[in-house]
Image: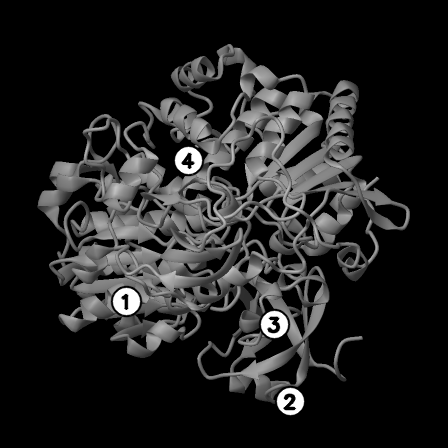
Amino acid sequence: MAKLPAPLPQLIDIYGPHPQRTPPHGWQDESRNPAEKLVKTHCCFCGQQCGIQLKVRDNQVIGFEPWEEFPFNQGKLCPKGVKRYLQSNHPDRLLDPLMRTDGGFRKTNWNEALDFTANRLREIQARYGKDSVAVFGGASLITEKAYLLGKFARVALGTRHIDYNGRLCMVSAGTGYKLAFNVDRSPIPWSDIAAANVVFVIGANIGECAPITTDYIWRARDHGAKLIVADPRMTPITRNADLYLPLRPGTDLVLLMSMLHVILREGLEDRGFIDAHTTGFGAVAESVKPYDPRTAADRTGVPPEAIEKAARLFATSERTVALHARGIEHQSKGVENVLALINLALATGNIGREGAGVAMITGQGNGQGGREHGQKCDQLPGARSINDPAARAHVAKVWGIQPDEIPQAGYSAQEIMNAIHAGEIKALLSTCFNPLVSLPQAEFTREALSKLEFFGVIDFFMSETAEHADVVLPGSLQEEEEGVTANVEGRVIHIQKAVDPPGNARGDSEIICDLARRLGKEKYFPYRTTREIFDELREASRGGISDYYGITYERIDREYGVAWPCPSADHPGTPRLFEGGVSMFPDGKCRFNVTEWRESGDPVSTDFPVYLTTGRVVSQYLSGTQTRRIGGLVDIYPEPRLELHPRLAAQHGIADKDWVTITSRRDEITLRAMVVKTIRPDTVFIPYHWANEQSANKLTHRTLDPRSKIPEFKVSACRIRKAEGAPR
């Protein structure tokens, strides 16, 4: 049984100096060079995937230089990008396989660790069935690893249960875009933002979560573009907005439907575009009739005059770009929110031309590429539906198996954890995912992990989740394996290998292939390098929506990235989708979709009268496994704070820096107050990067969007009180 081990410091103390290992199984080392060099690669953090040059000496990353030629960021980096190199030689790096003992963990060798892992997985499946084992992946993995992990789950294990932490990020956006356009990708290059006359930002804290994107907005502002921001908080970018819409958490859908109501009422829609390039307009027009601005104001808290002004600016601009992120997607109606925003763009003809469009801001490092090629529970390589017989036949042929050997769609990430808690799933293998911090209702997740009969983890730091594992396999950082990612624009970029993993750590791809061999599936996993995996991925994606067939590492280097779909070597790639209003549906038409308002799964009440919303801060990333270890980042924001308005603070006798207890229907935590005027008086905000008694996700709930299966992180109900002092 998986139990909590001894404290982490006991683990770190066991490491001494380790000579560089010789990779087994013929895995080729293609980059070792003791001379100092600059390696052109990309930041390992958010979906912008900014270009950076890592400075390497003696197989260690010792610094960085700007990569000014890379077109997306032109050398600019945020605080995380500047400090990211410091994790490579961090003293917390896992250097040896670890196995649980009664007293904590002990070091072991790879043969013992992998044999034990393979045997336990085999035993559990023999006793309970193939689907008693689940696999978790990560959206920060290079695309080759994501592809490999999907193949491993379905071919080596034969389980249908594989999903990834991108389920907590982009899936509502992807679901909405597929319903409207038949493709899951931001349809514009970021240069279109700079060419817009109006930029509408909703549910996206761009200044902290996607800092380099602010540069594109400032370029638009330089030529007179208007900026509209809708958010419960006045995030940093709002300081320069022409119009701010301070809506209540969870009411984005009402706002967007009301904006469309105004556009149609005043005849501002683009009838020519609608008639030529869309279907479903009539039903959507009828559905927004009840959402007049005054009715919407009562629900959203946004004045009706502001709703009308936003609608007119959006519709009368020659070129409008709408940007959205987790603020509208982390809701139990996240797909509807995305569809309502797309409806606005379609109604005004803001699709498929320079400076006009709607775009999702990808959150995780490879949030785009990580979901396209098979680690998502309902998807096969090439963004193919796992339920499509033709897709199954194509991928099965590439894999050398029969189509009926590919399992059907399995559970999403939260559903996997629910099934573990219920005793349906008995074993879990997880790579670069920290669900104890990332999933909602953290105590539920902790209980679930304690019920596993086997839990294996591949990671490069000991995360809070890994502390519950039976086996911890030390894996690789981004710069320790060659591969590709896809950035926020759908630009496929090259991750150059800079160094080897330290000590006895291995590349994640090598670990997965070695484990497949021990499960008797070696003929399906013959790879010696990640390039070989990429070549197979290209073939597996060929003819799919996310077609990489015409992309090679060398071409990426020549062209500073290639935007998919790119079906052949002579194809230019597709930086802008839907040129001329043509979608990726067989008829070429874009789809309007009716959206329907419903309440949050955790509504405010007399007992829990305050809205709780969560999000990021600029110096931290996701569950904080990496960034909480980097001193220069911790100093910027050393602990989570409860952000609240002075009026709400005064009601409870709370002053800035006082300790405050926040209680939801599930749990409570105590944090210091940060009293600010930049948040609604009925709302509090907590960043979610911290663990244990500082974890915001102890408070959040497990309500899922019924289509995307994304948890409703952004809308919870809570109450607050001044605490006696610091938590014990």
Picture coordinates of residue 498, whole percent (x, y): 47, 48
Q: Earlier in the sequence, mark 3 or mark 1?
A: 1
Q: CA distance from mark 2 to mark 1?
A: 40 Å
Along the line of sight, which residue is nearer the eye, 678 or 470? 470
Disc 2 marks which residue?
Answer: 653
Q: Is residue 369 left or right of residue 461?
A: left
Q: Quadrant of the N terminus?
A: top right
Q: Quadrant of residue 132?
A: top right
Along the line of sight, which residue is nearer the eye, 442 or 591? 442
Q: Amino acid at mark 2?
A: Gly
Q: CA distance from mark 2 to mark 3?
A: 20 Å
Q: CA distance from mark 4 to mark 1?
A: 28 Å
> Which callout, 3 or 1, points to the residue nearer the camera?
1
Disc 1 marks which residue?
Answer: 215
Q: Residue furthest right?
A: 102
Instruction: Please give the name of the residue rendered at 20% of the width and 40% of the height, measured from the top-left corner.
Output: 578
